[in-house]
Image (cartoon, rainbow, N blue to C red):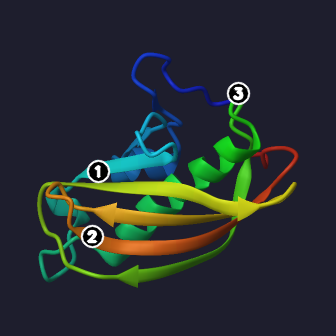
């Protein structure tokens, strides 16, 4: 079943196990033309230093960039994609508030898509960035 964003809000609930566990929201209506993913930081998202865990930052950027890639292949039904490569750069710490990841497609072809992502805090400060490669697949893997 294809994932479709709410036509009014642009919010999509893919209800994946990861989304349920982490609690992020997917927004396919950002002004940038890409895809967004945001998270209100809770105590369960923090590392032992009371900062947002780097692995969660990576998840958010992977999701935002992956949806941007999916949209670039098929806006109507969100083509399924797999992450081929994801490089991260952690820039600043954050421990509270909302963080937003924006994924933007930078190039690609029929089966491969390149995307960059930026994770910012609620003040607009850059927290982390990513460079990703995604591959379009013909069908979603069985659960």
Q: Could you say which disc has been placed on residue 76 in the image?
A: 3
Rate crowding at label 1 as few (under 14), some (14 to 19) or many (20 or more) other CA atoms within 10 Å: many
Q: Name the residue under label 1.
A: 39
Q: Percent from the top left, x then y, of residue 107?
A: 70, 62
Residue at the image point whose x is 47% and y is 64% from the top:
117
Q: Quick one: label 3 or label 1, which is nearer the N terminus?
A: 1
Q: What element carries label 2?
A: strand
The quadrant holding residue 60 is bottom left
Q: Could you say which disc has been placed on residue 126 in the image?
A: 2
Q: Is residue 134 left or right of residue 21?
A: right
Identify the image quadrant of the N terminus: top right
Q: Is mark 1 on a helix, strand or loop?
A: strand
Residue at the image point whose x is 22% and y is 80% from the top:
92
Disc 3 vs disc 1: which is toward the camera? Answer: 3
The quadrant holding residue 54 is bottom left
Rate crowding at label 2 as few (under 14), some (14 to 19) or many (20 or more) other CA atoms within 10 Å: some
Q: Percent from the top left, x then y, of residue 140?
A: 78, 45
Vertical comparison of 139 with 9: above or below: below
The quadrant holding residue 26 is top left
Compute the Cα span from label 2 to label 1.
Answer: 15 Å
Q: Percent from the top left, x then y, of residue 133?
A: 68, 69
């Amino acid at each position: 079943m294809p994932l479709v964003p709410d036509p009014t809000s642009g919010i999509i609930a893919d209800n994946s196990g990861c989304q349920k566990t982490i609690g992020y929201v997917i927004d396919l209506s950002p002004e940038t033309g890409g895809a967004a993913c945001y998270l209100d930081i809770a105590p369960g998202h923090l590392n032992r230093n009371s900062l947002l865990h780097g692995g969660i930052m990576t998840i958010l950027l992977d999701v935002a960039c992956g949806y941007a890639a999916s949209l670039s292949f098929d806006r109507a039904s969100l083509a399924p994609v797999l992450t081929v490569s994801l490089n991260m750069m952690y820039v600043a710490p954050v421990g509270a508030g909302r963080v937003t990841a924006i994924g933007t497609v930078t190039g690609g072809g029929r089966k491969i898509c390149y995307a960059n992502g930026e994770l910012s805090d609620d003040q607009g400060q850059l927290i982390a960035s990513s460079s990703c490669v995604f591959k379009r697949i013909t069908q979603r893997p069985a659960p």
